[in-house]
Every structure is written in C-alpha cells, then in structure tokens.
Amino acid sequence: MAAITGTNGKTTTTRMLTHIMKTSGHVVGMTSTGGIQVDGRVTVKGDMTGPQSAKIVLRDPTIDFAVLETARGGILRAGLGYSECDVAACINVTADHMGLGGIETLEQLAKVKETVVRVANDTAVLNADDKLCLKMADHTRARHLCYVTMDPTHGLVREHIRANGRAVVLEQGINGDMITIYDNGAHIPLLWTHLIPATIEGKAMHNVQNAMFAAAMAYSFDKDLDEIRNGLRTFDTSFFQSPGRTNVYNEHPFKVILDYAHNPAGFRAMAELADRLDPPGRRSIVFSVPGDRRDEDIRESCEACLPQFSHFICKADSNRRGRGHDELPQLVRKYLLELGVEDENITVIAEEEAAIDHALNAAEEGDLLVITADDLSRSWKQIINLNSDKQESKETIPGTKVFVPEKEKRFVLDQDEELIIDERGVRLASSEPEDAD
C-alpha cells in the first residue's frame, strides 16, 4: 500500500505509480481527485482523497495493491482512514488553502501532511529540495528514507548516499537529464527524462519531479527496473489518462494546454513550461483562482505568471466560494495592472465557458494558450470541438457507387445439404463419409 501527499503533483504521481504497478501485473485500487479506480475502471467519480475513499479501496477484495492520494482537507476533517502503509511520499509543501481549517502558516500545513509520512513502515519518500519535507524524516518510523532531489549537488543527499542511503537524483548528461537511483552504494541510471511522454520531451519539470517520485516509490516496492521504465514510458498526460494535468492539444494552428493550476506553485510551473516551450507567437492564459483563497495568495498567483505570459483572460470558477459574480476576475485584473500588465492585454469574462471560447477564438497561429479550468470535461470538449460547426466542403469523386441490397437474401439448402451450428458459428456439413480417402 502506497500513500501520497503534498500540495502539488499528488494526483499525477498517484496516477503514474498506479500505471507502473498495473503494467507490472497488479490489480490496483486508487483514490485521487478524479475518483476511485479499481483495475483501471472508475467506480466512484469526484474528489475522493479523504478517509472514506481510502476505506472503500482497502476493503475491496479484488485488489492486491492500493495507491491512496491523501489530501489536507480529509486529514483535518476525519483523519487518514488507515493506520499504516508500506511506502509514503510527501512531494512538497507550498501555499494553498491557507486560512482554511485553522491552517495559517506553511509550518502548520506541513504538520498536517506529515501525518501520512509518520505511518509509513518501510519507506518514506521525501522531497529533499523542500526544507519542510526534509524535516519530516525525523518523525517517521519507516525503515528506509529515500530522498528525491533535482539538484545533483545537494549536500545532505550526497552525505545520505555516502552513508549507503537511498535517493533518486536528476543528473545532467550529454544527452539530457537522467533520472538516477542511488541505493546501498549502487548507482543506477534509470531513464532519460525526454523519453517520458508526460514530461513533454523533458520540458515539463514539474512532471519530471512527479516521475521521480513515482519511480522512487515503485523501486521501494522492489519493482524491476524495466517495469518502472516501461510504466513511465507508457504514461502520458492525455486528457483520458490524466484529465486536467498538463493536457496538450496540438490539432489547432496554436498549442493549447489544459491544466488545473490553482495556486502560486501551479501557475509557476505553467510559466516555466511556457518558457521552455518558447512558442513563436503570444503566450496567453485563461486565469482563475478558487474564490476562498486569500487575497495575498491570489496576488502571488498573478506574480507567478509574469513575465512569461503576456495576455490574460480572467474568469471565475463556477462555484464562486463566497465571492461575487465577477469579484475575483476584477480583483485579478487589479493586481495584474499593479504588476505592470497593460490594460489592453487583460480581458475580464466572468463565466468560464465564455472566457475559454473567447480565448480559443482569439488565438492565432504559433500562439501558446494555457487554460486553467474548473470544469475539466466541458473545457476539454470546447478545446477539441473548436470550429467543429464549420462544415468543410468535400469533393465528390465521380463514378463512386455504394451497393445497398434491396432486401435480405435467403440462403437456400439443396435437398441433400444440412447446416451445422456450434461454437465456431454456422457451416455446411460435409457430404463426404468420415473414412473417405
């Protein structure tokens, strides 16, 4: 059983690990913000990251492996839903949901997420690049510590490796970035990041980190290296495999990315990806933040998009969470103006569907359009169905005819013939005797 927590990347890492375990032969039960899945089939839809969802999966007699995404809200309301797990991971602790549930500081938020790490028995997988995650190492009963770092010069991780500890490190090579495993003195190159589809040729660094966590957890379950490689190389961020998580659509003259970024770290990841993709045209973003976030967090989310994005379409989520009809997009507009964005580059359209339509129709060849959506299914349909109502004229090829029988033709048996019907279908019985030459 694996448990995953953190602020950003939980859902993608959960889906990655689930995919690795499924492709290596396990029947996996999974909880995530997208619902409950058993062996790849969605059994319950919705945000299922609380204790009741965990209990549903753990009571299922058909599974032999569980991957549980565990979120802050469920822990605060009713605990974990389990008392122990084999491997636990904390991906990061960044500002989100601040001011809710009595959580006012990052240190308090880290204490909540630390609950998951505390109950790990075998391995605790921790982000060595996040000091709040590093501090959790002293509060777990796990037999092994596995650090994940994107900095190959990390001093603490270096000493951990020298002490025969376990770590997953991103190392720069002549052919790109290599995910590397260190364990008990062994140095194990795993996979080039550009070979993982979810990383968009190694440019989506947030998914590089998620892949490193999924690999670290799978390795901690003694999965074969080739099974881990195969799982990562066959996992992509298509809408159907990972809805709302860096879904790229390239069938328009411009590139569209649909993502559920909703906090400063999420927007920063999108901005960094936009920089690495380096589109020849404009960089636009359909921008919104949940209405229950603090004003200072909303402003920080705006700052995270600059200077990478030049054009903003500001909207509100369907659930305003206590704010007025266009209160949040107008507040975002105010902050963007204060941060130096030209007024002509800011459009306020409160309704999400209308905002996305406007952005799609305004995009031009070579542009990059990032859409941060609330209703993921509807938004994806808007993206892929753009201009579908415009009928294309089709050239008729002369002389082409389609044969349609006037009526069903009966098959008539001769006097000495008979039909045989069995598991293979229907056939004519042979007229030859069995002992014929």
Image (cartoon, rainbow, N blue to C red):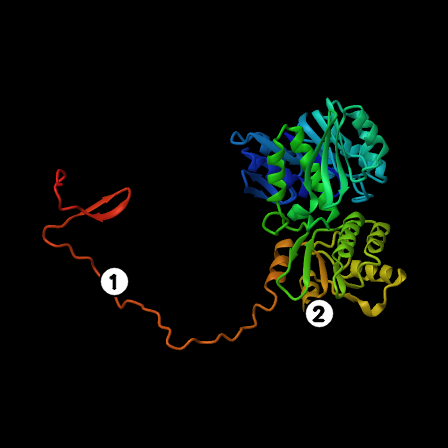
Q: Secondary structure at mark 1?
A: loop
**Circle 2 residues within 10 Å: few <14, some 14–19, many ≥20:** few
Horizontal placement of 12 versus 324: left or right?
A: left
User: Looking at the image, which is closer to me, 259 or 32?
Assistant: 259
Quick check: 45 above or below 379?
A: above
Q: Residue at (80%, 23%) from the top-left corner?
A: 163
Q: Position of residue 387 (x, y in %)?
A: 60, 69
Q: Position of residue 199 (x, y in %)?
A: 69, 48
Q: Amino acid at mark 2?
A: Ala
Q: Quadrant of the N terminus?
A: top right
Q: Which residue is mark 2?
A: 362
Q: Which residue is mark 1?
A: 408
Residue 291 visible in rendering: no
Say whether disc 2 or disc 1 marks the residue closer to the N-terminus.
Answer: 2
User: Looking at the image, which is closer to me, 194 or 312?
Assistant: 194
Quick check: 334 above or below 106?
A: below
Q: Secondary structure at mark 2?
A: helix
